[in-house]
Amino acid sequence: MSTLEVTRFAPSPSGLLHLGHAYAALFAARAAAGGRVGGRFLLRIEDIDGDRARPEFEAAIFADLAWLGLAWEEPVRRQSDHLADYAHALDALQARGLVYPCFCSRKEIAAEIARAGAAPHGPAESVYPGTCRALDAGLREARCAAGVPFALRLDMARALAEAEAENGGALTWHDRAGGRQCCDPRPQGDIVLARKDVPASYHLSVVVDDAAQDITLVTRGADLFEASHVHRLLQQLLGLPVPQYHHHRLVTDGQGQRLAKRSAALALSALREAGRSPAEVIAMSGIEEDLTP
Ligand code: GLU
């Protein structure tokens, strides 16, 4: 590999890291080291959701990663220190007329989807049906003035059309596992960019952060594959560089279920307390087999 790779691990401090996080962190660190000497492995604390983020979980992230033997480059980027960057990106999208306020509650969205006949628990279940997209301007203003809480959503169809026109054709991105991808974020609908209590959604903050940290290779779980379509679109609209991607498998438990923050028994701290060594935990994660050609 000839490029100098810059990778990152970006956990949210909303729970304890488990074996799946160990896999993801090791994957990113190895991908940086696999590049030319001088590859950089960075850490980002995704604490923008102030309701869920806890300082004790952040401290545990540092302790767990150090225990695994990982060394990351300082400074660590903490999202809550960079709210102005996300606001600036949001402003840029708003100035292009690609954002609209959505006053729907979760319950109203679910009811609207049910009315439209989407299968319960089907893929369309969580896709916003666009209720507030065409809201009359006067009504919008009245609701804002009355203090009705709202989320800001991306007008997906319009955003994609503008981005493609600007690019002179379809957008593409590259996944190291799956190859060239045609960017199609439309199935995800009008995604949320910000809420009153969370000033930037995951989608918005991650593209701003990856650019700010000069990330060249985003490594992350296959569960975020679809999100990468949205990220490619936002990169185009915001004039940000486009990194490469490598979506990796998810670690599962004995029953084949993917691990969640509640999989307490496989928390790294629990494994450590149970007397497992870092080498044993690394072996348990399965990363060595996956990375051995
Ligand atoms: N914070 C995200 C998570 O914990 C990772 C985001 C990413 O890798 O883009 O799942």
Image (cartoon, grey):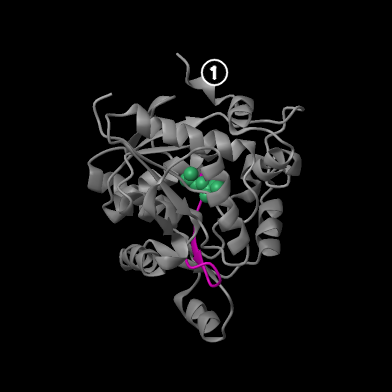
Q: Position of residue 157 (x, y in %)?
A: 42, 50
The answer to whether residue 153 is seen in the rendering is yes
Element at label 1: helix
Count the marks. Answer: 1
Mark 1 residue crowding within 10 angstroms, few (<14) / some (14–19) / many (20+): few
Residue at 59% across, 79% down? 148
Q: Amino acid at mark 1?
A: Glu
Q: List the single residue furthest toward the bottom.
A: 146
Is 39 contained in the magenta span?
no
- Report the quarter where the N terminus lies: top left
Q: Position of residue 204 (x, y in %)?
A: 43, 56
| Front residue of 91 and 38 | 38
Q: Is residue 293 left or right of residue 65?
A: left
Q: Is residue 208 left or right of residue 264?
A: left
Residue at 33% across, 35% down? 172
What residue does disc 1 label?
289
| Front residue of 56 and 166 | 56
- Report the quarter where the C terminus lies: top left
The answer to whether residue 13 is seen in the rendering is no
Residue at 65% across, 49% down? 16
| Front residue of 278 and 198 | 278
Vertical position of residue 257 compared to residue 162: above or below: above
Residue at 73% across, 42% down? 263
| Magenta residue span | 188-199
Q: Position of residue 86 (x, y in %)?
A: 39, 64
